[in-house]
Image: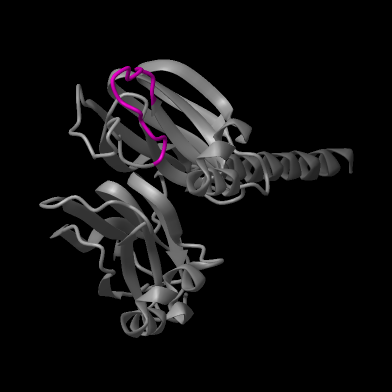
Amino acid sequence: MNSKLLKKWTLLAIALVCAFSVGAVLTGGAQESTFDWQATNDESARLDPADYHTGHVFKSGDQTGNVHVDIAAQEPVTVEMAPAQEWSEAARHPELLPRVNFRCVREHVTKATYVCEVVPGRPMILVLRDERDSDRTAVTAFGAPLTEHGTVREFLSPNDIHIHYYRWACVENCNPPQYQWISELKEIYDLTSALKIYDGITAERDGEPFSVKINSPVPMTVAIVPSRVADELRGKPDNLDSTFDNRSCMQRSVRSAAFECTFDLADGPQSFVAAPEPGSKVPPNKKVGVEVVASKCVANCLTDIEK
C-alpha cells in the first residue's frame, strides 16, 4: 500500500515539475516590448542677435508630455520652457516678457540634448533665445529687428539653429501603425498686407498631429481654422482679430516659429490663414515661407472599425 501511494506521489511530482517547466518556457519565450526615445521631426531657423525662436507646445499626459530634443546652434543660445498662455500674452505685449515663468533654463547651448518634464495640466512651449547682444540696433523680442529709424534691417551674423524632436515610443517587438510626416502645404509667397488663405487640410483620423512652420520678415498671425471660417474671412478680412479669439491652433506676432495642433475627423476641412500683425510695416520685395505637414498613417493602419 505504501509503495503504491509513494508511486502516485512520485508521478504527481513529475507532472507538476513538467507543468512548471512548460509554463516557464512559454513565459520566457514571450518577448516584452522595448521602449526608447525615437526621432520624430526636426526644424531649422536663423536668428539675429537677441532674437527668439518658438518651438513645439508640449502637454503633460500625452505622448509628447516630456521634452527630449537635440539642439545644435552656431552661436550660444538659451533654451527654456515657458507656459504657453504666458508666452502668447507676452508675444502680443512684449512688456510682459519679464513676468514669464521660464522652467528648465539651460544657458550657453551650442550642442546638447535638452530634457524637461512638463508640469501636469499646463501646456509649455519650447523657447530658444540668441544670447548675443546687438549694440547698433534695437531688437524686438518677437518682431523684426529694427534700426534706429524704424526700418527692417538685414540679418547680421546669422545664428543657424537646428532642433530634432523625440518621443517615447516602442522600438522593438511591437507592430503599431506607422506614421510619416506628409506635406499638406509648402509655399513661398510675396509678402503683402493682405490676408493669405490656403485650403485643403483634412485629418484622416482622430488626434492627427499637424505641424506648422513660418518664416517671415515681419510679425505675423498664423492659424489653422475651419474652412467655413476661412470663407467668411475672405469676405470680411477685417474680422481677423475677433475670428481668431480663443482659437487653439494659432500663433500671434511670430516671425520664425513652429507649432503643432491636432484635429479629429469630425473637425472637417481646415484652412491655413496668415496675415501681418496690424500696424506692422510691410517692406517691399520680401518673401514669406509657410509649411504645414501632417502625420499620416503609411503602414499597419487601423481599419474604420478598429478606429
> Among all residues in the image, which is located at the extreme right?
1
* 293 relative to 154 in the view: left or right: right
Relative to the observer, which residue lies in front, 186 or 168?
Answer: 186
Decide: is 43 above or below 266: above
Give residue 151's quadrant in the image: top left
Q: Which residues are magenta?
A: 130-142
> Among all residues in the image, which is located at the extreme front?
149
- x, y percentage for residue 43? 28, 41
Residue 28 visible (yes or no): no
- x, y percentage for residue 54? 41, 40
Residue 119 visible (yes or no): yes
**Does the stretch in magenta take in 115?**
no
- x, y percentage for residue 235? 33, 85
* Residue appearing at x 59%, y 30% in the figure: 98
* Residue appearing at x 26%, y 37% in the figure: 45
**Does the stretch in magenta take in 132?**
yes
Relative to the observer, which residue lies in front, 166 or 258?
Answer: 258
Majority secondary structure in the magenta region: loop
* 223 relative to 122 in the view: left or right: left
